[in-house]
Image: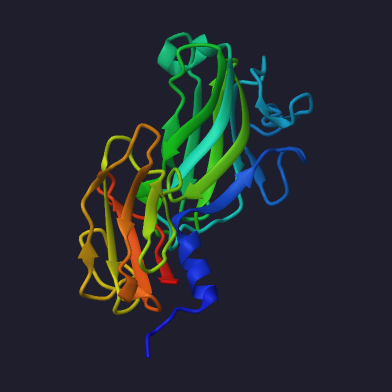
């Protein structure tokens, strides 16, 4: 008898390519529920406040308070089982000349990660914006923290009557831009379409399949959900939008078999979600 994955298992595998672990738009105030405001100049600096006009976090250039040193600390989150993690957020900068990098002040806007409850922090992003303005959709690679648990994000403002900084739409997401593999038309004697989206534009994409089981099998890309022997299809090239697709004939004798299949982005060495589908 052929082995068929349960529906729950297939859904879990299909969702493994992208995993959002933190999302905050500050619409409920600052600090939002579960977050902590650490003010290292308490009593003088107000620190992070709520910008009620646009529902976002705001740290302004406070005159006469000395050096403002304030961090919004997120709830604890885990990156166990996720890969290619990214942080994205919207940023707006005022008085940008007073960032240290621009030479007129000592200001720093940083996104930091802690794995020890906030005792120590690693800077994942330091604002090097050339001047005042809006900088939407900033993306930060957090893959160095893939697989780790007990993490926190710190949104850290530092400056002596320096810059102003607004932050909104903070998202930490596993799976990078969302590497997703899908199939359609898996019918014996017909043409099936295999599609990978979210791949590296212009890069190679490799698709493999097995008829013998769900694995796992170790490969240079990591464990795949296929058992040997695994058949590799010709390498595809992703287009400018990161989509690679091919059409292939499904033998009529394959009807009723379960196909275990998965793909990999050769540029990033990242695996897609896996699929287990019965040929109709």
Query: Residue 123 placed where, x, y %?
Result: 42, 38
Q: Check the picture and name the quadrant holding the N terminus.
A: bottom left
Query: Residue 203 placed where, x, y %?
Result: 26, 39
Q: Is residue 48 above or below residue 24?
A: above
Q: Can residue 121 be seen here? A: no
Q: Is residue 221 above or below residue 52?
A: below
Q: In the depicted view, which residue is nearer to us: 254 or 39?
A: 254
When asked about the image quadrant of residue 159, the answer is top right
Residue at 33% from the left image edge and 71% from the top image edge: 252
Q: In the depicted view, which residue is nearer to us: 34 or 274?
A: 274
Q: Can residue 189 be seen here? A: yes
Query: Residue 169 placed where, x, y %?
Result: 62, 36
Tally of numbered tags: 0
Q: In the depicted view, which residue is nearer to us: 26 or 58?
A: 26
Q: How is the image coloured?
A: rainbow
Q: Check the picture and name the quadrant holding the C terminus.
A: bottom left
Image side of residue 270 versus residue 104, left or right: left
Q: Is residue 179 above or below residue 156?
A: below
Residue at 42% from the left image edge and 10% from the top image edge: 103
Q: Is residue 60 above or below residue 245?
A: above
Q: In the depicted view, which residue is nearer to us: 20 or 187?
A: 187
Query: Residue 109 placed where, x, y %?
Result: 51, 27
Residue at 31% from the left image edge and 56% from the top image edge: 248
From this viewpoint, which residue is outermost toward the bottom? 1
């Amino acid at each position: 008898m052929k082995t068929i994955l349960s529906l729950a298992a297939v859904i879990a595998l299909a969702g493994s390519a992208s995993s959002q672990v933190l999302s905050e738009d500050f619409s409920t105030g600052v600090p939002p529920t579960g977050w902590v405001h650490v003010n290292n100049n308490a009593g003088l600096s107000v620190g992070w406040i709520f910008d009620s006009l646009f529902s976002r976090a705001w740290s302004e250039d406070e005159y006469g308070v000395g050096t403002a040193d304030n961090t919004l600390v997120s709830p604890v989150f885990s990156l166990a089982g996720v890969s290619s993690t990214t942080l994205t957020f919207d940023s707006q900068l005022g008085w940008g000349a007073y960032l240290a990098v621009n030479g007129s002040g000592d200001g720093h806007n940083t996104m930091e990660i802690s794995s020890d409850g906030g005792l120590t922090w690693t800077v994942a992003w330091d604002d090097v914006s050339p001047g005042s303005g809006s900088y939407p959709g900033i993306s930060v690679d957090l893959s160095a923290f893939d697989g780790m648990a007990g993490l926190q994000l710190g949104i850290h403002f530092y400056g002596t009557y320096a810059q102003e900084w607004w932050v909104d739409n903070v998202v930490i997401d596993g799976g990078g831009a969302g590497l997703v593999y899908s199939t359609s038309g898996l019918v014996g004697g017909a043409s099936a379409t295999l599609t990978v989206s979210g791949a590296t534009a212009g890069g190679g994409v490799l698709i493999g399949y097995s008829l013998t089981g769900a694995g796992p099998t170790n490969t240079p890309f990591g464990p795949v959900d296929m058992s040997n022997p695994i058949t590799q299809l010709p390498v595809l090239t992703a287009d400018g939008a990161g989509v690679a697709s091919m059409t292939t004939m499904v033998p009529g004798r394959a009807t009723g078999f379960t196909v275990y299949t998965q793909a990999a982005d050769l540029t990033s060495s990242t695996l897609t979600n896996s699929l287990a589908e019965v040929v109709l």
